[in-house]
Amino acid sequence: MTAAVPPALRVEGLGLQIGGATILQDVDLDVPAGSLVGVIGPNGAGKTTLFNTISGVVRPTAGRILMDGRDITGTSIPARARAGLGRTFQTSSNFPRLSVLENVRMAAQATTGGSYSLLRFPGRGDDATRAAIESLEAVGLADKAHLAAGDISHGDKRKLEIATLLATDASLILLDEPMAGVGSGDVAGLVERIRDLHRTKGCTVLMVEHHLEVLMGLVDRVAVMVSGSIIAFDTPETIMADPRVQAAYLGSAA
Ligand SMILES: Nc1ncnc2c1ncn2[C@@H]1O[C@H](COP(=O)(O)OP(=O)(O)OP(=O)(O)O)[C@@H](O)[C@H]1O
């Protein structure tokens, strides 16, 4: 008998109380390895807080978080990154004064090992620079490699975050509103980049996104959060047809 493969991410009975307020309550979620899962819910439902607990920014006050079957609840942010967790934030998390290439190269360097020096001009030959250039080519940013990350457009900043994740060996990726503020002309390209992350690298992806029409065409399953809890977790078709979801989410979001 072969042992079952553990989910890439398991959240068990997760709770978070802050100053008497319940922010997360009894959150259970299994994200199978290799799946692409969306998280939706009205403003203030707890989606970003859930990501913060998974990535280690916030410690939950109840429950456990497991990656590939290993309990990571008490581990540090760097330990989670070493275990293969990668994340983007609602607002851009790039280093604005470094060049686009340096931003990606730093992430690649952390993966390929060796010490990173900003003083050393990146040569095309080293592994980290090669990985960075490949990632920038994949997201269509190679021609902006030399620009300061703070000077590129909002849509390009989101592409840069994806390139940064592509350059690492993260196996579980959390994307927090990757389409937020992205112009309509850039959305289709960004969706393709997320598909690339998922397919080419075989990553497991969990993403919060308010653009439902985009999300529903992209993900395998959707978790619906309302008031700090997950009220439904199913295929996009079933979620869209669920009257509880329509009442709790679509109704209140309209
Ligand atoms: N550190 C904190 N202290 C107190 N309350 C907090 C804290 N962090 C989050 N909250 C509250 O927890 C709730 C959930 O916030 P969160 O940002 O996770 O929601 P969200 O679903 O991501 O919302 P949005 O879709 O608007 O980004 C909100 O009511 C928020 O005000």
Image (cartoon, helix red, strand yellow):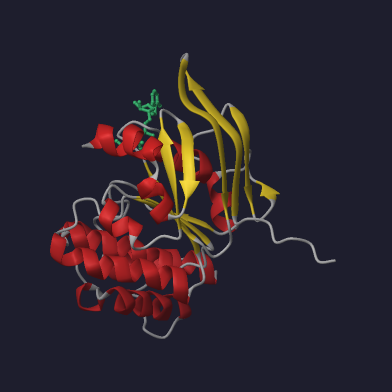
Along the line of sight, the residue nearer the viewer: 128 or 215 = 215
Tally of marks? 0
Spot occupied by residue 20 in the image (x, y as percentages of width and height) = 47, 13
The N terminus, quarter of image: bottom right
Name the residue: 56% across, 59% down. Answer: 84
Figure check: 71 above or below 156? above
Spot occupied by residue 33 in the image (x, y as percentages of width and height) = 58, 62
Along the line of sight, the residue nearer the viewer: 130 or 71 = 71
The C terminus, quarter of image: top left
Figure check: 121 above or below 106? below
Ligand 1 image position (quadrant): top left
As drawn, is 146 to the left or to the right of 105?
left
Q: Which quadrant of the view contains residue 133?
A: bottom left
Along the line of sight, the residue nearer the viewer: 83 or 249 = 249
Spot occupied by residue 77 in the image (x, y as percentages of width and height) = 53, 46
Spot occupied by residue 69 in the image (x, y as percentages of width and height) = 69, 52
Farthest top residue in view? 20
Residue 34 visible somewhere in the drawing: yes
Figure check: 133 above or below 227? below
As drawn, is 64 to the left or to the right of 89?
right
As drawn, is 254 to the left or to the right of 39?
left
Name the residue: 40% across, 54% down. Answer: 236
Residue 148 visible somewhere in the drawing: no
Name the residue: 52% across, 67% down. Answer: 169
Name the residue: 32% across, 51% down. Answer: 93
